[in-house]
Image: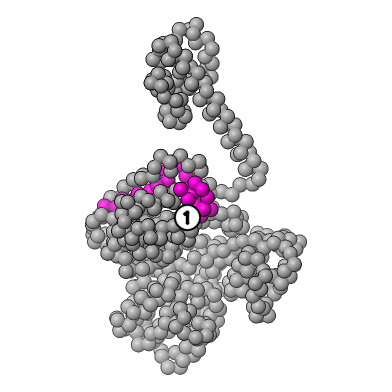
Amino acid sequence: MAKRTLNVITGNQGAGKTDKLRNVAAMTPGRYLFACPTIELAEEQEARAKKEGLIPYIRRLHSGGKTNGKVFDQLVALKDEINAHHPHAVVFITHETLIGNAFNAFQGWSVMIDEAPSTLHSGQVQAGATYDLIINGLVPAGSNNGWTHYTMDGVAANKPRHNDLSKDAQKFLKEALRPTGVFIEDAALKARKAFRWFSFWSPTYLSAFNEIYISASNYKGSLGYRAMAFFFSHIFHLVETDVSRPRTGQPEIEIRYFADSHTGSTSFWDSEDGLKAIVEVADYISKHDPDLGFWSANGSVEKRFQGRFGGEFIAPLAMGLNKFRHLTKCAFIYSAKYTPTDKPITEVTDITAADITDARETEAIRQMIMRGAIRNGDHSGPYLIYLYEKPQAEAVQKHLNKNGFNNVVLTHVGSSAMSSINRKIATLVEKSDEERLAEMKAASAARSKRNDDKKFVEKWARKAVAAGYNRLADFSATELKGWQKRRDPLISYVDKAIPLLAAGQDMPLLKDLD
């Protein structure tokens, strides 16, 4: 069977990828569904298409409360009307409508997708009294590496939602009831035990359409594409059109970040140390940039930022918005890193933990910071970005350099208290219980060694002060009789501690003497 073509419009952010999609729809008469990430973007694109006046029939459908009935039911009815009366038409919908329904009845139409839908989900369902209810109606559709792809049959699709189900079970059912189905680990399901699952959406489920177009600056890096390439590379092949535009202006971009010794996460920001860190971020921005242009954050952080400084809030996963192109200051305090629930995806596919963090967190940051003035190719003035942590700042700097921005500097603005937070840079690889235990033992041993070294350095530094010496080398061979050869790497610490103790200061941590 011949592979289907997936037409991908790629290019740097702000290059006009979505304009290219509209132009194809305008210049090539036919019937098109045009899927946008949000209602706001669908409205924006509808307005632009109407203003251009090149498409005879334009409609928009979404669940924003202005229409009655299910959106997809209305869409099917509208499809019949368009088929009968409108040979050249575009209907704007949202990603939610696109990924949640089967489009088998849209033969002869084409579909255009603005940005890659973020639709990789995973979780675990526990065994219990509702187990049969949850798995009833699963129909196998193919297996791979100990996991089976299931869809729900028509009977199961009509069963009511049960409020007494756990959130994990409800999440599973929501994805299982989609046309895309879910992947479930075989051994656990056959043994009727708690099972892990994952799901993803890809254009493979749009086979009824004549042509499939998608616009995205990093489609091959998206999790949906990576999963599709792993499972369905025999079905699709990509044809890319690059619409990148060279920059004519070179802005002076400063990325200010707060954490240099740890990374953030939603669970950390809900902890005592995390809350202190978020308060520091809010205090700094409200003091130095109270008139911030636009900002975004995870939900719990958003609540703590409200009212602390100016600027318009944007939802974290906003894509393609153009109304902020005049603004020169932004902040995005956000985390969407790899978590243990993502492990099934990394076990089955060639997607790594680092890939997940890059596609989910870093790509969201790249999209957000490009909403402002640097989206304009001729902008050459200052542009300020606030991010939470150093790895994020470095990743964005690398991305901007790669895309033609030559003047990007990083500035650490976090306090010493922020730097002293005892939280490691987030690990990207989930570890077994044995590995965690080994790490805990190693960390405990390292702490003991640091404490022992500190005591040893302090002992010899105080001996030097008492003897009136300025460095360890002033001791005679006889006086150094108690010095241990294996402690030679600590000599420089002793020499640095001597003047501090002589001045009456307390013995500092060894890391503070580096």
Q: Position of residue 87 (x, y in %)?
A: 41, 89
Q: Is residue 227 left or right of residue 401?
A: right
Q: Amino acid at mark 1?
A: Ser
Please, what secondary structure does the residue beneath circle 1 have?
A: loop
Q: Nearer the viewer, residue 451 or 308?
A: 308
Q: Position of residue 31 (x, y in %)?
A: 43, 84
Q: Is residue 50 left or right of residue 4?
A: left
Outermost residue on the bottom side: it is: 85
Residue 121 sits in quarter: bottom right
Q: Is residue 68 above or below residue 97?
A: below
Give, as a single range, the part of the protein colored magenta: 252-276
- Residue drawn at (36%, 45%) of the image: 413
Q: Position of residue 47 (x, y in %)?
A: 34, 79
Q: Which residue is mark 1?
A: 335
**Quarter holding the C terminus?**
top left
- Residue drawn at (72%, 63%) of the image: 127
Q: Position of residue 12 (x, y in %)?
A: 35, 62
Q: Is residue 459 above or below residue 48?
A: above
| 101 within the magenta span | no
**Quarter holding the N terminus?**
bottom right
Res 240 seen here = no
Res 511 seen here = yes
Q: Nearer the viewer, residue 223 or 322?
A: 322
- Residue drawn at (50%, 6%) of the image: 478
- Dot 1, crowdedness within 10 Å: few (<14), some or many (≥20)? many
Residue 247 sits in quarter: bottom left
